[in-house]
Amino acid sequence: MNNRPIADSNILISYFTQDANFEQSKKVLLEGALLNLMIFAEVTNFIQNKYSTEQAKKTAGRILSNASHFSFLPDDHDLLVSAHKLMEKFLDNRLSFIDCFILSQAERYGLFVLSSDQKMGNYNKVRIVNPFNTKL
């Protein structure tokens, strides 16, 4: 597909809320990242719940209008099934369905994932890079 990573929602939330990891998230996101609709929904819902509907609308608009930095991966029924199977396999690790979906996409397309979620690292078929702890 390409060499851009899939960015987990925690990377985008750091960027859009300008938290303590803002500079690292900005650096990796400006290099370009892949998203899926679940990540997009998770980020905008987080912003809406923590801040406001208006802020969520602005965040969504910024993501959608920056096609040079953010591209959306395709999804399908087989990816949903794969994510469900992963969730069952890693039930003890409490991986969310969205995390399992991201891992399924990364495995299918041969991509790595940018995430600060340590639980995702338990899946050894996909490389997880924490940009907050790693020099890229």
Image (cartoon, rainbow, N blue to C red):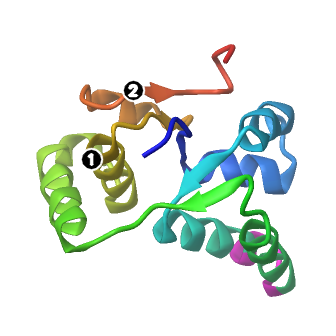
Report the front residue among 130 and 127.
Answer: 127
Foreground disc of the pair 2, 1: 1
Q: In terms of secondary structure, what is the magenta stretch mainly?
A: helix
| Side of 54 where 74 appears, left or right | left
> How would you rate the neighbour count of disc 1 (Cα within 10 Å): few for under 14, some for 14-19, many for 20 or more?
few
Residue at image position (23%, 67%) is: 80
Q: Type of residue at label 2?
A: Arg
| Side of 12 where 112 appears, left or right | left
Q: Which residues are magenta?
A: 48-53
C-alpha distance separating marks 2 and 1? 13 Å
Residue 126 % position (x, y): 32, 31
- Residue hosting label 1: 108
Residue at image position (42%, 46%) is: 1
Residue 2 % position (x, y): 49, 41
Q: Is label 2 in contact with label 1 (beta carbons under 8 Å)?
A: no
Q: Earlier in the sequence, mark 2 or mark 1?
A: 1
User: Is the residue 59 above or below the residue 32 in the image?
Assistant: below
Residue at the extreme bottom: 53
Find residue 60 and name its label.
none
Provide the secondary structure element on which disc 2 rests.
loop
Residue at image position (56%, 40%) is: 4
Residue at the extreme front: 1
- Residue hosting label 2: 127
Give residue 62's quadrant in the image.
bottom right
User: Is the residue 66 above or below the residue 52 in the image?
Assistant: above
Q: Type of residue at label 1?
A: Arg
User: Is the residue 29 above or below the residue 123 in the image?
Assistant: below
> Looking at the rendering, in which quadrant would you find the C terminus?
top right
Give residue 124's quadrant in the image.
top left
Residue 34 lies in magenta, yes or no? no
